[in-house]
Amino acid sequence: MGRITGSGGSYVLYGRSTELAALEELAARAREGRSGALVLRGEAGIGKTALLDRAAQSASASGMRVLRVTGIEPEADLAFGGLLQLLWPVQERLNELPEPQAEALRAVLGTGRTRTQDRFLTGLAVLTLLADLAEQGPLLCLVDDAQWLDQATSDALLFAARRLAAEQVAMVFATREEGFTAPGLTELRPSRLDTGDAVSLLAGLGLAPTLRDQVIAESAGNPLALIEFGAARRDDPGRFTPVTVADRVLSSYRTQIAGLPERTRLALLFAAAEGRGDLPLQMKAARTLGVGLEDLEDAERAGLIQVTESTVVFRHPLIGTAAYQGAMLARRIAVHQALADAAEDPDCRARHLPLATTSPDDGVAAELVAAAERAADRSAYAAASLLHQQAARLTPDRRAQVHRLADAATCALNAGHVGQARDLTEQAEKSTAGPEDLARLAPVRAAVMFESGHQREAARLLLRRTDAAGSELGPAMLRTGATYGWFAGDADSVREAARRLASLGEGDPMVEGMALLVDDDYGRGLPLLKDAVAAGQDGSDATRTRALHSAVLLGDDAAAMELAATEVARCRAHGLIGALPRTLHLLAERQVLAGAHRDAEASVAEAMEIARDTGLRERIAWLNGVPARIAAIEGDEQRCRDLMRDVPDVGRVAGESALSLLELAYGDYEGALGRLETAVGPGPQRHMAMAMATVADQVEAAVRLGQSERAERPMRAFEGWARAGRQPWALAVAHRCRALVDGREEDYREAVRLHGQGRRPFERARTALLYGEWLRRDRRRSEARASLRSALEHFERLRATPWVERARAELRAAGDTTTGAKATAENVLDRLTPQELQVVRLAADGNSSREIAAQLFLSRRTVEHHLYKAYPKLGVGSRRELARLNLV
């Protein structure tokens, strides 16, 4: 706002030099190939729309294409209403997208036939579409009144905005103070106008100086208030206005509307209630109440609306608010009923029905449920949740009402609204004591509890309510309860879940295997986990997921790596963005064990970026455990401790293992041992894969302290686990631990032999170091040097600085005079960022930029931007040269 119209439709904006400069810089950067996004945040009337108008005008003059969407308050809960408005002019470009993305946007437009599997796939599709449009020239995407965007549209646009990089796309969101959160995007708050600019803005109204000064004082620098109050005082110098600026503006509009004929006020109410500006629909509905097109004329002459052949637009959204709020409830209900009856689109009808219905109505509730299911099919879970809630409110039958609240809670959880899901389940539970209904609510309730850190309670809730769940839901609840119990260290829950599944004839090898492990029955438990791994090779998605977790519990690095990589590839191929952070996390953990630290960092970096873009904040804290482990191995104490500050309780074992490894590396043996004894301790948690991996640290710390008895219990458990699982790395570590305690060379030799078959280079190097130390103490210095040099080579490759220093010190003590404190040779891949590493590897494998973009959820231009940055770092100039490099 803050504008004066001039010749040719141009206008002057007062007091907006900073904001205009920021918008021009954003557009200029896009024209240069550097994408970006900006949020304009401020109160109603501060001039956000005027700034967007100027940005659009300037962009068009420079040759940029402009796409624009405006949030509409009545559509705030209509699935993808905003995105439909944005995409309609460019829908012909959908066929250029990867098929899963194209189908997701066809679902938004109502032309798709398949259910969208992932709520973030639509955001990826929007990113790809904007990037493709920008291939023809720079693009400016403007979003006004973002606080009124429906959640599905908001999620999709923010996902795209956060992943812009080199696509020649600029995005600007204008929003009020509340209602639209955009963490990670730059925000700019238009300031109130100072007195000089306010005087300039009012100059054309011909106000006397005294009245002008009163208007300036009352408006508090709000440009819309200046214009409206100025016009009102000019026409009625004695008018009294309310206290706040917002109330004053609304009061001004209400006063103008109140002076219009009754039929005109009713026509404005139809426009405000309909909200989208659809003139044919408004007139079709309005005729049932005796209102016609001619009744809009007085409002149009007063400058309150603009009318075209097919649209009605309020000059400012607050005018529509005033028209709606100023109407009596009975009149609003009648208007919404007329709009519902006139609507041909069932989703449009569903938007008006709850506002026209004041008492329970089965028919209306059924229509809302159908609309909720359509919204869920398009992954618009927030809208689906609200529709289910509205249906529940209008459902006369108490049990059906509980079912609809349960569906609303499930959709809220799928939308990432954990708190809302909790509130809805609590509301439903208060409405029923029926065991079947409580069982239906249990999965959502338990998921909320698990995400909130109450894993044991979540497991036990599912087990308590399984009996009433029925054959369709019960087995899934038991499997989930067993998994929650395992993570919580609740042996009883795992055993109980396994027993009940067996009694139902639904035996699950993973659950049965876990139940045997918590009772130390490795001989029977681990073979069952092997069966679960084998079953996942050609099974369903759920079976493959259980196979992956079984491989992790089993310590089968090869199978776990293959299954994790396959699952990541499946998520990429189908656009399952929401599942990727968890799957990449599992892959990254396996990559650390394999010594592929840079690969692991790339996996974690991608997972964190997706988690941030999709609001999965809990997963970010979980992910920190992977770089913390790398930092511990590499001796970066500050980074390791910084990363571990935010690890959630359920991931504490992983965090404590990283910190204990760091303490072990620097000789704080008491600190390392005490930390692990506290974190792992007795109980089922010691059977977790990560806890088993820390036994070697416990044993070494205890032996260094001369207190090997403190390591005896975990060492015996680990030996039994290793013998039953027959994983070479585990058997090697078991022999190393026994050699440390008993001092027998045959154990060291067997450990070295078995490491040759395994996949964990850090453990192999530690064995070589400890064996070399033992040989030196046995005065076999030549053999010691050979073992220590092997350890040194592996540690240097891993950048394991404290361990490198230990190996060098041992070599010097063994009489090696050639080993100095030389710098570790640089790996050329260390020059690349994690995302550059991912891109160059895919490019070296022959993938095109478009194929890489689809896999990494980026745009083609961003992929090429990363390639061009990577080439000089690697000393190459083309993809052909890239393919010749060793990028392992």
Image (cartoon, rainbow, N blue to C red):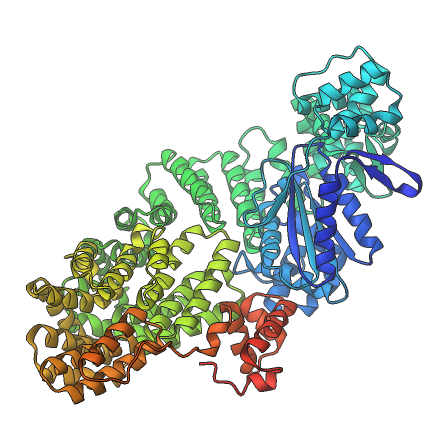
In this rendering, position of residue 674 left or right of residue 631: left
On the question of residue 786 being in view, the answer is: yes
Q: Between residues 711 and 68, which one lies in front from this camera angle? A: 711
What residue sits 24% from the left and 64% below the top? 666
Q: Is residue 755 visible?
A: no
150 left or right of 683?
Answer: right
Q: Is 821 or 153 nearer to us in this picture?
A: 821
Give me the residue at 44% from left, 78% from top.
827
Q: Nearer the viewer, residue 267 or 187?
A: 187
Q: Nearer the viewer, residue 639 or 409?
A: 639
Please identify the residue farthest to the right as the structure is shown. Answer: 7
Residue occupying the point 52% across, 61% down? 117
Q: Is residue 118 left or right of residue 674?
A: right
Q: Residue 491 at what x, y percent from top left? A: 19, 56
Q: Please state the total of marks drawn on the protein image.
A: 0
Q: Is residue 150 above or below residue 687?
A: above
Residue 142 screen position, x and y as percent: 71, 49
Residue 59 rendering spot, x and y as whole percentages: 79, 53
Image quadrant occupied by the N terminus: top right
The relative height of residue 565 versus residue 616 in the rendered view (above or below) is below
Considering every residue shown, the one lying at the far top of the view is 238
Q: Is residue 423 left or right of residue 140?
A: left
- Which residue is painted at 36% across and 63% down in the image? 626
Q: Quadrant of residue 195?
A: top right
Q: In which quarter of the image is the C terminus?
A: bottom left
- Dividing the picture into quadrants, the one containing residue 321 is top right
Q: Where does the image place residue 494, in percent across and percent down from the top left?
A: 22, 57
